[in-house]
Amino acid sequence: MSFYSNGKFLISGEYLVLKGARALAVPLKFGQTLNVAQSKEPDGQLRWIALVYDEFWFEVIFDLECLEIIETSDLVKAEYLKAILKQAHLLNPKILRNTKGLIIETNANFDINWGLGSSSTLIANVANWFEVNPFDLHFNTSSGSGYDVACANADSPIFYKIKNQHPEIEKVNFNPDFKQNLYFVYLGKKQQSHQSIRNFSGKLEDRDTEIQLISEISAEFTSTHDLEEFEFFIDEHEKIMSGILETPSIKQSTYADFQGSVKSLGAWGGDFVMMTWRGEYEKLKEYLRTKKLDVVFRFDEIVLSR
């Protein structure tokens, strides 16, 4: 058996998506595979080999009956994986029943440090393998909103919203006329989303007005045909979130001299940003090199849209 899930970007609605805001999210052309095969290993063992770019990342051997770790090359990663597998097994015990031995291989085709969804693609793949609802598995093992799990199984951009504690997913057309002016830039440091959520959770209460405004901006992002208007909504979104989080926007703090708009994607302070740029691509790369940034993608290079 083989499974594949997409990575993700959260274009709008960071943090407030947890409180019911409508967020815009896009699946990516990067993702992770999970292959399941019968094993020639000793009976009663599950050997898990994780690869990144086809290169070894870590390995763990589980006791197949109790899913406890027998040995591993990385205990922290193995414990996280164990928690996911145990929850999946609780949701559907039939999958591992009467199984003598298994070998699992995962392979991510993106740098794990980029924060494109190593956890969400894993959860989605395991859920598909165990034939369980990926959101049940996600919410049993994570504090995030689940938009990343929605992107894992999507083939085009989506609106994502939590209503009455249940995710609502709506396919949406987000293929801007000015997409040649949109770039995604890695800031050089992976942000831990769960830690960022904890840091700011107290600032998210009683934000009905901001939730409504952010929801409206999400819709505007998908409907505008004008780059200048798109930039206006980026700047408004950043201003609203800056006020809530009591934190300067990324442009204010780091890119005040940049001739375009800069939008944080997901947790503030790390991973990727979306930038608008009207000049030549080489000029943008020259500017980014002055900031010691060298991982940049054009819209069509990274956003999945069928």
Image: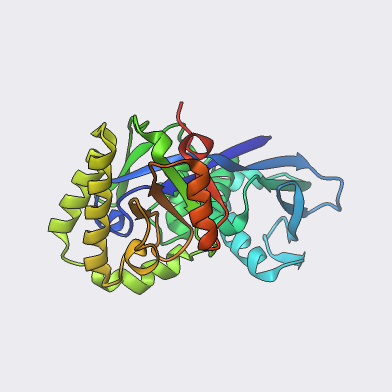
Q: In the drawing, does residue 258 fall left or right of residue 1?
A: left
Query: Is residue 47 something that shows in the picture?
Result: no
At 57% from the left and 42% from the top, the residue drawn is 30
Q: In the picture, residue 293 is in which quadrant?
A: bottom right
Q: How is the image coloured?
A: rainbow
At 42% from the left and 35% from the top, the residue drawn is 180
Residue 173: x %, y % from top left? 33, 29
At 64% from the left and 70% from the top, the residue drawn is 76
Q: Nearer the viewer, residue 253 or 57?
A: 253
Residue 233: x %, y % from top left? 23, 47
Q: Nearer the viewer, residue 223 or 257?
A: 257
Q: In the picture, residue 36 is in which quadrant?
A: top right
Q: Nearer the viewer, residue 113 or 276?
A: 276
Query: Is residue 65 something that shows in the picture?
Result: yes
At 62% from the left and 37% from the top, the residue drawn is 3
Q: In the drawing, does residue 55 fall left or right of residue 207?
A: right
Vertical position of residue 219 compared to residue 110: above or below = above
Looking at the rendered structure, the number of numbered marks drawn on it comes to: 0
For this orientation, the residue located farthest to the top is 306
Where's the N terminus, which quadrant? top right
Vertical position of residue 156 compared to residue 241: above or below = above
Residue 18: x %, y % from top left? 30, 57
Q: In the drawing, does residue 18 fall left or right of residue 148?
A: left
Residue 59: x %, y % from top left? 75, 59
